Amino acid sequence: GGKGTMKSYVETGNLINVSHKEFFNGLKNYHLDKKNRLFVHAGFTSMHGVEKEHNENDFYWDRTLWESARILKEVKQERRSDLETRLDLYKEIYIGHTPTTNFNQDTPMQGCNVWNVDTGAAFKGKLTCMDIDTKQFWQSDDLPSLYPNEKGRN
């Protein structure tokens, strides 16, 4: 849950550093790059994009974006715009929060222009990093083989 990270950060004394405070106060719950690629933990619900999201909790908890992308993957392109506009606001969307292991897959999954790169490392899966330009990815071994006594969130 990040308690160890918080504790070690407090111990450094940097918590009172003005430039660190400015950095943390300026953070957003998402990142949008110059190529119109969105990076968000879970999703968003506003049909007008992340800038118009009314409930910040959706950045952390929303799974409807991923479910829409999975379902719409099967819908013909000409029908998609009638059904879902959130996906078309961004060139690509990268999310986590919903482990691909829930779908019996231990690699990143794509639905339309949404990439789910959460491969279950918090449970019994693997940690994955992806080159978003090439879609090449690298993975750790699974959690139980790396840390046999660690239960993760299981």
Image: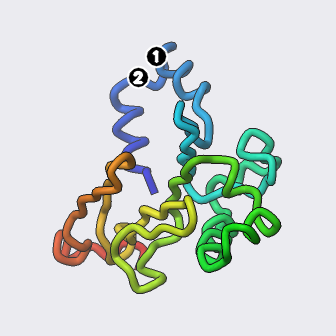
Q: Residue 43: which quarter of the image?
A: bottom right
Q: What is the x, y in percent for residue 17?
A: 46, 16
Q: Residue at x 77, y 62 (%)?
A: 81
User: Relative to 36, is 54 on the left or the right?
Assistant: right
Q: Residue 110: x, y in percent?
A: 48, 67
* Residue 142 image-quadrant placement: bottom left
Determine which residue is flagged by label 2. Answer: 14
Assign a secondary structure to mark 2. helix
Q: For the residue marked with disc 2, what is the amino acid?
A: Asn
Q: Is residue 134 above or below residue 153?
A: above
83 relative to 136, above or below: below
Whole-number angstrom distance, CA of label 1 to CA of label 2: 5 Å
Marker disc for residue 87? none
> Residue at the location (43% across, 51% down)?
2
Could you tell me if the residues under marks 1 and 2 are in contact, i.e. CB atoms within 8 Å? yes
Task: Choose between 145 and 104: the one closer to the eye.
Answer: 104
Residue beneath the point at 43% across and 42% down: 6
Instruction: Say whether residue 24 is left or right of residue 150.
Output: right
Residue 78 is situated, as x and y percent measured from the top left of the image, at 73, 68
Mark 1 lies on a secondary structure that is loop
Q: Residue at x 52, y 57 (%)?
A: 95
The residue to which callout 1 is attached is 17
At label 1, the amino acid type is: Asn
Dot 2 crowding, Cα within 10 Å, few <14, some 14–19, many 20+: few
* Residue that extends furthest to the top in the rendered view of this protein: 18
Q: Position of residue 3 (x, y in %)?
A: 43, 50
Q: Residues within 10 Å of mark 1 (few under 14, many from 20)?
A: few
Lateral position of residue 39 relative to residue 153, left or right: right
